[in-house]
Every structure is written in C-alpha cells, then in structure tokens.
Image (tube, rainbow, N blue to C red):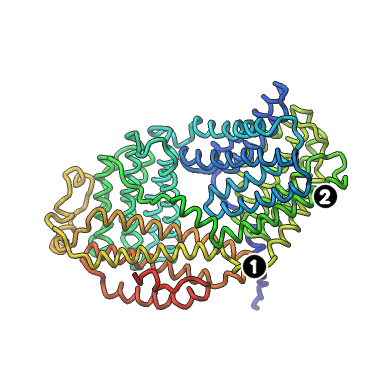
Amino acid sequence: MSRSRRVLPALPPWLAHALRAQRGPVPWSAVTRGALSAGPLLLVAVQVGRTSLGVVAAIAAMLAGINDRPGSRRVSVKRIGVPALGGALGLVVGTYAGQQTGAVVLTVILTFVGLVAGSISAIGPVASAVGTQLLVASAIGAGMPLPEPGWERALAYVAGAGWLLVLRLALPTPGSLAGDFRFDGERKAVAGVYDAVAELLDAVGGPEAIRRRAALTAALDHAQDALAGPRLRRYASSSAERRLHAQYAAALPLAEAATALAWAGEAVAERASEGPRRLAAAVRGNNHTGPLPAPSRSAPALRALDDALLHAAEVFDQGRGGDLHTRPRTPRDRLRAAFGSAGREYGLRVALCFGASSAAAQALHQGQWYGQHEHWYWLPATAVFLVKPDLGPLASRVLNRAAGTVLGAVLFAGFAVVLPRPEGLIALVALSGALIPVATRHFAAQTAVVTVLVLALVMVGGEPQASMGRIGETLLACAIVLIVGHLPMPGQRGGGVRARLAAASEAAYAYLTHVLDEADTPRIGTSGTPSERRTTASERRVTDRATASDHRATASERRVIPSDDRATRWTLRREAYRTLAEARTAISLSAHELPALARHTEGADDVADLLERLVDTTTACAVHLDDTGRIGPEHTERLTALLDELAGPVERVGLRPPGTPLAG
C-alpha cells in the first residue's frame, strides 16, 4: 500500500529571504570589542557627569560595531573610521539645522541630506556606510535635545567610534600568534584563497564546481581588500607584509589554472589539491611549505597548475613582495557611480523616505502624540535602515525590522522593571554591544539588539521608558518605506542592477579583448622553458616529478608572455570576476523583492550566467594560450557561441550589445 506524501508549498522568494540567516563560528574577538566599547564609554561619561555626551559616544560605538566585520586591521580603519566621519558631519548638520530652522525648512534640509547620502551610497559598501551614518546622525542631531553644541557632539561621536577602532587595532585576535599580529587578518585572508583553490580542484568535474568557483572569487576579493587597505606609505613597508603580498600574487596563477580545469570539466587526481592546502597551512603558520606533491602534466591546465605550484614554492622561499593586481578607483569613477542611474534612483528614493518620515515625525511631535517624549528622531532613523538595499530586499527589511523592534521593545520593557538605574542599564548596553557582532547575521536579530541598546541609552539620558512609542514609530516607518519603495520614479527601474551588470559586461569584454590581443602577439624569446628555469630550491620542494620529463618536448614550444602583459591580464581577470560577483549580489536581492519590484530586473540573472561563462572561457583560453601559443578551436567555438547567445538577453535588460566593447 503506497503512502502519498504531502508536499509543502515553496515559500515565495521575499519571505524565504526574510527567514534566512548567515551561519558561522562566533566571532569572539568582535564580541569582546563590543563589550568593551559602548558600555564602558557610557560608564565613564556618567561618572564624570557628562551623560549626554556619553550617550552620543555610545551610539557612535554601536554603529561602528555594526561595521566591525572580519578582515584586516588596515581595512577596519576605512570600514569604521570613514563612516564615523560621515556621522560626525551629519550630527553637526542636524544639530544646527534643528536649532536654527523651523519644521518646514528642517524637513527640506533633511530631504536634501537624504538625496546626497543616497547618491553616494551607490559608490560602494564603505560609501553606503557613510551615507547611513550621515543620515542617522543628522536625525539624532536634529531630534535629540542635548545641552552641548554641535561641535562637541561631533567630537564625542568621533571619540566613540575611535575607541572601538583603537580596540580593533590594539587587541590581538586568535590568529595573531603566528608572526606579526598586525597582519593576522591579511594572513587568514590569503590562506583562505589557497583553501578555496584546493576546494575547487576537489570539485572539478562535479556539480559543486560552479559554487566552488564562486567561493574562490569571494576569497580573492576578500584577500585583495584585506591587503589593499589604506596605508601611510605607498608600498608595503615591512618584510611580513611584503611576504603576504607575494603569497597573494602567487595564488593568482593557481586560481587561473584551477578555473581552467573547472571549465574543462574533467576530474583531476586527488593529489592536485594537496599542494594548495599545504600552501594555505604555510600561510597560516607563517612557515615554510615543505614538499609539494606535483599534479599530472597531461593537459595545458594541469601543466599550468604545476608551474604555478613551482612559482609559489619560490615565492614562499623569497617573499619579495608582489602586485595586488588591482586598479584604484579614481574620483571620476566615484562621481560617475554617484550621478549614474543607480545613484540617481537610489538618491531620490532615500530623499523621499527620509524627508517624509522626518515630516511625519515632526507633525506627530508637534501634535503631542509623543506625550512626555521629546525625541522624534526614531522614525526617520528607522526609515534609513529600511531603505538601504544592501541590508536585504525591501519586504524582508520591513518584516525583520518590525519583528525585531517588537521583540527588542518587549525585552527592554521587562529589563526596565527589574534593572537598577543607571548601573543595570549600563550593563545592558555593554551586553547589547557584545551581541551586535553575532546579531548582524540576521536583520531581525540585529534590530532587536539595537532596539534594546538605544532604549537603554536614552533612558540613562533621562527619558522615560518608551517601548510602545518605538513600536508605533517603527510600524509607521515601515509603511512609509513600503509606499515610497513602490512609487514610480523617473527613468527605468532597477538602475542599480543594470549599473552592476553594465560594469560586469565592460570588465568581461576588456578581459576578453586583452587575451585575444595576446593571441595576436608574436612569440618572444623562448630560451629557457619553465621546466628548465626551475631553481634548485624549488626542485627540493617538489616530489614525484616522473611525468614532467614526458612533456618537456612540448613545453619548449610554449610562448613566453611578457610579465607586464600577464600582470595586466590578472588585473583584468580580477576585475571581471569581482564585478560579476557584485552584479550577482544585486540581482539576488532584486529577485527576492515583491513581484511588483522583482519584475523590473527579470532576465538579469541570465545575462550574469552568460557573462560568467564568458569569463570562465576566457580564462581557459588564456591558460591554453600560455601552453601552446594559440587559442584552441574548442575555445574559439565556445567564445563565438557565447557572444552570439549574449546579444538577445543583454538587449532585453537594457544594456549595450555584447559586440560593442570589442568594436574598437
């Protein structure tokens, strides 16, 4: 007797995204920093009688804690410090605008601030964080009655964020025991690249290869960002940092060979991944690699993998530094992003949401809806987080914000009854600061923790318990953002997705054009093949070389690519994969919107798939070109088919035809 199963209906994408949470180990270092940031700052301020400034500093530390993500210390300066400066500026603007203007003029000023902040958010993640803190701080400055002038509030704000940054730079982390603790984040990121290469090699020929190749791109992006953070000097100044730069650069040919093997789709021997794993262990332990097992040399990509391992062995011995293969964005590039279609669309939407919520908050405040509560900034500040697309799709943000606020407000109402004041509330602030790094994995959890923290702060500052008011303001902000988010805007909807896709398309064709130009370049001197140029030190690092001699006859016929051309190629390849990953993220967020919004970017995922296949094929062409001096007929057929296949989908999503970048 057969039993029929009951199949549960699939959740709609917008609801599935709202329930999704990130996973991973608890970041204990960040938890420790969170516990030592907002709570102790508030305690010191209360002890010296400057409670209001302590509240401002604690808010800054809280927002800095949200930006305290995994990575290198150098990158944390940019991720935490630059947004804090934007917040200090917003605090000054909001304070003086709130003190010297009426409700109508103040609403106009805040709307303009929203337009500027929204436009600059299209530049990138750090600029988006700057825009967020600029808006939140301007609302707090205008709506929080404090006795201090604007410049003192700004200094307290910078001090609060600066304190967390000092903790980030000074406190050791679990990975800092191997070598110079200043570069433990860089070391972990570079080791992650070698691990990702090994995992991709293990997945070659299987269904996980595509996902592992995307994971390799993410690891390379993370390592590139970790090493390319702001610095006082132009180049790496210490031997430890130069060594890490060299180890990162040595991973690029390994990643290229692994991608070519994944493109070919033929499984490789298990020992092929042992070499990258030993290199990853050497990076983590800051020690030598030891013997590296050699993969088979029966195909161009396998020979490229073997040569890349030999090159890595030399680099790990010498560690003289290496190019990060990244091109910094110019001010012109940033202006183009801010004033492009994505910046204009997002700027208008943020301006409308921020302005409308500010006007509603002031109307409610003037009508005494707040009762004894003088703070009206919660409504516009909530709208800021709801309108940020990098925090998730609109429907997901609204659901999670509402649920998180209700949960946080209810929890705080219970704490407020039993905790002593101010000691218990300060301890609650410290606990909430410690929970923020874990809570950032889900927007509802983050909202709940932030709600508890902010309610505790304003209560320490002298305001009565205001949980119910915060719930009402949050629900009103959700309604405003939902309405504005579905309003028609000038121009074509989905500008952010199209801008990301356009950047990915341009980078993919620039990479393809460079490889095709390499194919047209005549061979240059071939004295000394890669097999013959190996150093004695490298040969001692490599075992099982019996198969290498079988291929020396063909290896001597390889063309030698000038190092500058190869460096340019790797730079273009990195840009192509990075822009594709950014486009994928934007497309995924758009696909999880409500159907009324998701339909504006239909077909974008197909274009990204084709561009990704084009970049993978170009990488396979480059590896084959290095080995044989020409592009194989299979590669040519694939490229031609992909270019023809791209024409229709690209035009449907409103981008330039795929042949345009190659026309020159």
Eye-nearest disc, 2 or 1: 2
Amino acid type for the residue under numbered disc 2? Ala
Left or right: 118 as drawn, with respect to 313: right
Residue at 50% across / 38% down in the picture?
A: 77
Kindly tell me whether residue 278 is visible in this rendering: no
Name the residue tied to disc 1.
Answer: 597
Give the secondary structure at mark 1.
helix
Q: Is residue 78 visible?
A: yes
Quadrant housing the N terminus? bottom right
The three-letter code of the residue at mark 1 reads: Leu
Q: Position of residue 481 (x, y in %)?
A: 71, 58
Q: Position of residue 543 (x, y in %)?
A: 22, 49
Q: Position of residue 505 (x, y in %)?
A: 44, 66
| Quadrant of the image containing the C terminus | bottom left
| Residue 445 horizontal/vertical position (percent) | 67, 48
Residue at 41% over, 49% down:
328
Question: What residue is shown with label 2?
Answer: 363
Q: How busy is the neighbourhood of tag 1: few (under 14 within 10 Å), some, or many (20 plus)?
A: some
Q: Earlier in the sequence, mark 2 or mark 1?
A: 2
- What is the count of numbered marks? 2
State the residue at coordinates (65%, 63%): 14
Task: Name the residue nearer the viewer: 157 or 414.
Answer: 157
466 up-or-down from 660: above or below = above
Which image quadrant is residue 565 in?
Answer: bottom left
Crowd rating for badge 2 (residues with CA inside 10 Å; few <14, some 14–19, many 20+): some
Viewer-proximal residue among 249 and 286: 249
Q: Quadrant of residue 3?
A: bottom right
Mark 2 → mark 1, Cα distance in angstroms: 30 Å
